Image (cartoon, grey):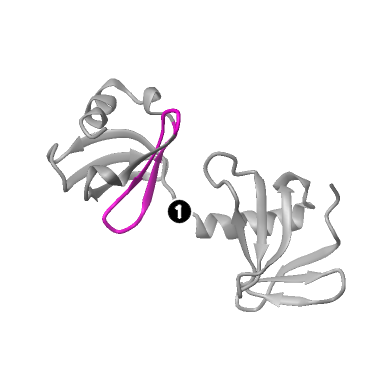
Amino acid sequence: MTLPAFQLRRNAFGRLVFESADGQTYDGVVPVRAFPISDADHGLSLVSSEGRELLWIDRLADLPAPARDLIEEELAAREFMPVIQRLVSVSTYATPSVWDVETDRGSTSFTLRGEEDIRRLHGQTLLIADSHGIFYLIRDALSLDRHSRKLLDRFL
C-alpha cells in the first residue's frame, strides 16, 4: 500500500506538524501505535491534537527516513516503559510491596499496590503497573534468572 504524500516537521516549539498533500496543516500531531507491545513496528496512526486520525501507517519502515526519524523520536519521548531484566528483591510477599529491579534503563524501586497490577498480556509477557502509573514490561518471564522467577511466582 502506498502512503499519500505528506510532510512532517517540527515547529519552533518542538511539536510535530503534519502537512497533507492538499496543503492542510495540523500542529501538535501525535503518533499512536496500534499494538505498542506485541507489534510495535506495525500499525501506527498520526493523530491531530483533536484526536482525529490523519494518516494510517501499516509499517514504520515504509516511511522515508526523515519522517520515520521524527516519529521514532516522538514515540521515544512519549513511551516510557522500562523492561525488567532482573528482580533484585521485594520488601514483602504481601501487597503493597516495594520491588527493587534492574531494567534496561538502570536500577530502580517501585511500589506494587496489588497483585491485580500484574497483567499477563500473552504467553509469558507481563505488564506491571507501579503506584505512580508507570508501566514495566517483562518480555518473557521464563527467561528471567531463577531468583527473579522465584520472587515473581509469589505474586502470580
Which picture quadrant has residue 6? bottom right
Tell me if residue 44 is in the magenta stretch: no
Vertical placement of residue 99 versus 87, above or below: below
Across and down, in percent, residue 64 comes to 79, 52
Please indicate whether residue 94 sits to the left or right of residue 73 in the image: left
**Residue that extends furthest to the top in the rendered view of this protein:** 146
Across and down, in percent, residue 17 comes to 70, 72
Please indicate whether residue 114 sits to the left or right of residue 61 in the image: left
Question: What amino acid type should be assigned to the residue bearing mark 1?
Answer: Phe
Crowding near the residue tagged with mark 1, few <14, some 14–19, many ≥20 C-alpha atoms within 10 Å: few
* Highlighted magenta segment, given as a residue range: 122-139
Across and down, in percent, residue 2 comes to 86, 50
Q: Which residue is at a point 86% across and 62% down the rendered structure image?
A: 5
Q: How many marks?
A: 1
Vertical placement of residue 39 versus 17, above or below: above
Vertical placement of residue 71 versus 47, above or below: above
Please indicate whether residue 7 sits to the left or right of residue 39 in the image: right
Q: Which residue is at a point 61% across and 70% down the rendered structure image?
A: 51
The residue labelled by disc 1 is: 80
Camera-side residue of 144 and 108:
144
Q: Which residue is at a point 67% across and 62% down the rendered structure image?
A: 46
Across and down, in percent, residue 22 comes to 87, 73
Q: Which residue is at a point 55% across and 47% down the rendered structure image?
A: 36
Which picture quadrant has residue 153? top left
* Quarter of the C terminus within the rendering: top left
Which picture quadrant has residue 126? top left
Circle 1: element type: loop
